[in-house]
């Protein structure tokens, strides 16, 4: 079989002229297969057709970056056909070829144009604030990240890094060599029935991930946990917690649900909420401990963007704007 080896490294440029730093490796191309340092892109066999996806080419540690990638172009969510073709026009011929090579799940099923269908199938929010559930105002198409299949218990989490306009895909847990690499396409804090409805409507497949395969009491418990995480995330994010003791109990419950659901990328925001309650209650020693947990968890799953900020909060919780804003009391730290 004929093979080609090529390097797409820092010599490549995206349409904006910025260099792409993602492919820090040789890419070995064969029909339908590519090898990278940490993963392969190849057809995946499943009960249902899963198309092409990524699988680990080595054991990958929790928190390890498997891929950093610039979008070939981005568009606001309210895009139309003209906007997609306009974005494509700014791309060089190689990127155009890669775009048209991407999967289109809306092919025969809707009135979408081919360009709209490809964008809808492969677009990834640039700037997802997964903590609050609010998403960015733009979506981008990424050559490699677009090939990552979905799971409601994903083993990678994509973090958009605004100042370099790149997405970083980090392992949410240890990934074994040859294991399929999956990201979450939708809000994962919905019950299974809602997740499946959304995946079918937007991506035309029935998810059979470990969370979707559950039945009976186990399914009920999983749905309840995801609902609880969402409820508490919204409550604490919107500053609706006025009772610090109850708030910390809720955070403990949320962290337990997060662990049981295998969604550790949601941890850091709850650690931050716990920091907030302790700092607001003038309990600085415990505030420091929660801030350390928030920093380390954010660093592991989202990178160093908030590290300096957390270090300042750890050094002096009193510099936090909401410090001392609630009745003073001694709470508790992470166990
Ligand atoms: C963004 S693409 C992912 C890459 C795609 N597999 C390919 O061949 O290019 C999204 C499409 O992949 C397929 N897909 C993704 N996750 C899947 C899963 N867990 N089970 C079955 N199909 C899946 C669906 O057809 C979906 O519309």
Image: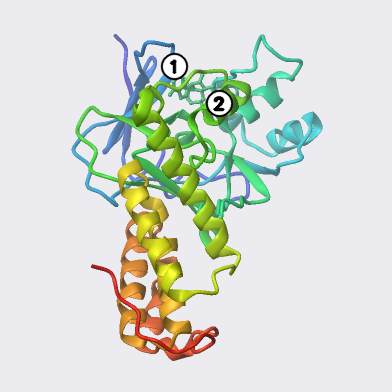
Does the closest atom of ligand 1 sit within 8 Å of the Cβ of label 2? yes
Residue 227 % position (x, y): 49, 44
Closer to us: 75 or 125: 125
Query: Compared with residue 289, is residue 114 higher up or lower down, i.e. above or below?
Result: above
Identify the residue at image location x=36%, y=14%: 46
Residue 51 shows which numbered tag?
1
Query: Compared with residue 122, is residue 174 higher up or lower down, i.e. above or below?
Result: below
Identify the residue at image location x=59%, y=28%: 198
> Which is nearer the N-term, disc 1 or disc 2?
1
User: What secondary structure is marked by label 2?
Assistant: helix
Residue 91 % position (x, y): 64, 37
Q: How dense is the environment of label 1, judged by Cα within 10 Å: few (below 14), some, or many (20 and up)? A: some
Closer to us: 314 or 287: 287
Q: Which residue is mark 2?
A: 199
Report the side of 166 relative to 65 (left or right). Answer: right
Report the side of 58 relative to 169 (left or right). Answer: left
Identify the residue at image location x=48%, y=40%: 188
Image quarter where the N terminus lies is top left
């Amino acid at each position: 079989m004929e093979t080609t080896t090529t390097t797409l490294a820092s010599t490549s440029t995206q349409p904006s002229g910025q260099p792409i730093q993602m492919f820090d490796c040789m890419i070995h191309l064969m029909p339908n297969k590519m090898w990278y340092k940490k993963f392969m892109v190849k057809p995946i066999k499943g009960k249902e057709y899963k198309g092409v996806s990524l699988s680990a080419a080595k054991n990958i540690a929790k928190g390890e970056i498997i891929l950093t990638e610039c979008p070939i172009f981005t568009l606001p969510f309210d895009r139309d056909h003209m906007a997609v073709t306009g974005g494509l026009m700014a791309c060089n011929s190689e990127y155009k070829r890669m775009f048209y090579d991407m999967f289109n799940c809306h092919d025969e099923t809707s009135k979408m144009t081919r360009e709209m269908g490809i964008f809808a199938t492969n677009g990834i929010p640039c700037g997802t604030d997964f903590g609050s559930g609010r998403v960015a105002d733009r979506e981008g198409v990424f050559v490699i990240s677009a090939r990552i299949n979905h799971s409601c218990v994903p083993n990678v989490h994509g973090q958009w890094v605004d100042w370099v306009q790149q997405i970083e895909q980090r392992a949410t847990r240890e990934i074994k060599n040859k294991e399929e690499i999956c990201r979450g396409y939708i809000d994962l804090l919905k019950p299974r029935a809602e997740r499946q409805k959304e995946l079918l409507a937007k991506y035309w497949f029935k998810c059979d991930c470990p969370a979707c395969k559950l039945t009976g009491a186990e399914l009920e418990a999983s749905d309840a946990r995801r609902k609880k995480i969402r409820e508490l995330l919204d409550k604490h994010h919107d500053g609706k917690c006025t009772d610090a003791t109850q708030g910390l109990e809720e955070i403990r419950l949320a962290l337990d649900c997060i662990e049981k659901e295998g969604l550790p990328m949601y941890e850091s925001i709850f650690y931050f909420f716990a920091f907030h309650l302790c700092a607001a209650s003038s309990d600085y020693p415990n505030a420091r401990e929660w801030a350390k947990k928030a920093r380390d968890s954010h660093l592991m799953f989202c990178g160093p963007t908030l590290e300096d900020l957390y270090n300042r909060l750890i050094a002096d919780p009193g510099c936090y704007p909401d410090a001392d804003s609630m009745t003073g009391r001694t709470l508790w730290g992470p166990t």
